[in-house]
Amino acid sequence: MAGRNPLKDKLEDEELDLSMMQLTDVPVRDIEQLGSKVLTVNLSHNLLTTLPGNFPLLSHITKLDLSKNQLVELPENFGGFKSLKSLDLYANQLVKLPVSFAQLKNLKWLDLKDNPLCPAVKQAAGDCITPNDCAMCAKKVVALLQSMESQLQRERQRRMAEEMAQQKEIEKREEMERERVRQEKRAAKEKRREEARVREAETKKETDQKVRHEMQLNGNQNAKSKNNLHSSNGHASSPDPAVSRSCLGSLVMFLLGLAVIGLGLAVSLIWIYTEGRLDSKSVSTALPVIQSDVEDYLMAVGLKTVK
């Protein structure tokens, strides 16, 4: 079972009287539990220096007395008291009012006497001696804060526009830098291609020069050889020893090739005639037969040649 609300005895005819209780903080939760039947809250003659941020959420309050406290500031969301018609801030330490004060469009009575107000607010507030003065104070102060709010909105919009312009300028510079890098890369790539083309052309030129030089050398050698042949003037030139040695070597290699072929042929014939038996007896028996067959074959070839 929930405990009894300690402020219930302070509520009478929609007015909650919390004056002269030496309060240093506003019991917002207890006030909120009393519900919307609390329309007037009297917190005068206490020790309040600030107000809790959730206090303006009690937007159903129509009359608020904060006189003779030690308030040095009001919460930034003080404009949450949208139903507020009467506000007493007499004898506090307020220098300025929050911009949200401009939202108190239902405010009809305001007392700001005995506060060290800034010149602009002090001028708008006036003396607040008579009820009519306090009504005029409410009207002028709310109008002043509405003007300040409009100026702040315009300033915020101007700053936002400047920030957007700066951001666009930054993006533009970044895009220009990216384009510069892209151009540099394209230029470097084109330079590499041009260098490759130049190297290829130089290589081709060198190759062509080498080919022409070799062709020229070969042509000179051929011409020299022809001149040597004709210089003998009909006389046989002495054979070149190197050429003679080369021919002799070729003849020897040819004879060796014939010998290898003959040897292979002989081995093949022996293998055939001995039916693969290469023992000495089989070989001795096969040799006369092979000799006879070879002689017959040669005689037959000779006869055909004669015809």
Image: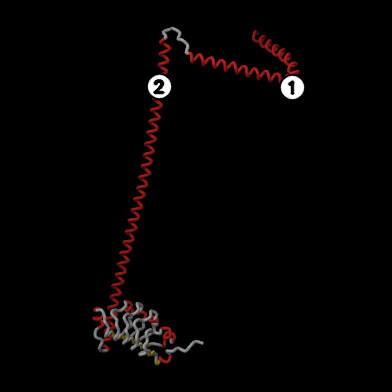
> SS at mark 2?
helix
Q: Is 306 situated above or below 275?
A: above
Quadrant housing residue 227: top left
| Structural crowding at the residue carrying mark 2, measured as other residues with C-alpha within 10 Å and reported as few (<14), some (14–19) or many (≥20) | few
Q: Is residue 91 above or below residue 268?
A: below
Q: How is the image coloured?
A: secondary structure
- Residue 172 in the image, given as x and y percentages of width and height: 33, 56
Badge 1 amino acid: Arg
Q: Residue at x 68, y 19 (%)?
A: 267
User: In the drawing, does residue 105 fall left or right of residue 230?
Assistant: left
Q: Residue 25: x percent and y percent?
A: 38, 84
Label number found at residue 217: 2
**Amino acid, disc 2:** Leu
Label 1 packing within 10 angstroms: few (<14), some (14-19), many (20+): few
Front-lying residue, 191 or 48: 48
User: Separation of disc 1 and disc 2 at Cα?
Assistant: 63 Å
Closer-to-camera residue (74/151): 74
Tag 1 secondary structure: loop
Residue farthest front in this picture = 280
Q: Are marks 1 and 2 in contact (CB under 8 Å)?
A: no
Name the quadrant containing residue 171.
Answer: bottom left
**Where residue 188 sits: x, y (%)?**
36, 44
Q: Position of residue 37 (x, y in %)?
A: 41, 88
Q: From the image, tell me which residue sits under label 1.
A: 277
Query: Image quadrant of residue 284?
Result: top right
Q: Earlier in the sequence, mark 1 or mark 2?
A: 2
For this view, does 24 lie left or right of residue 136?
right
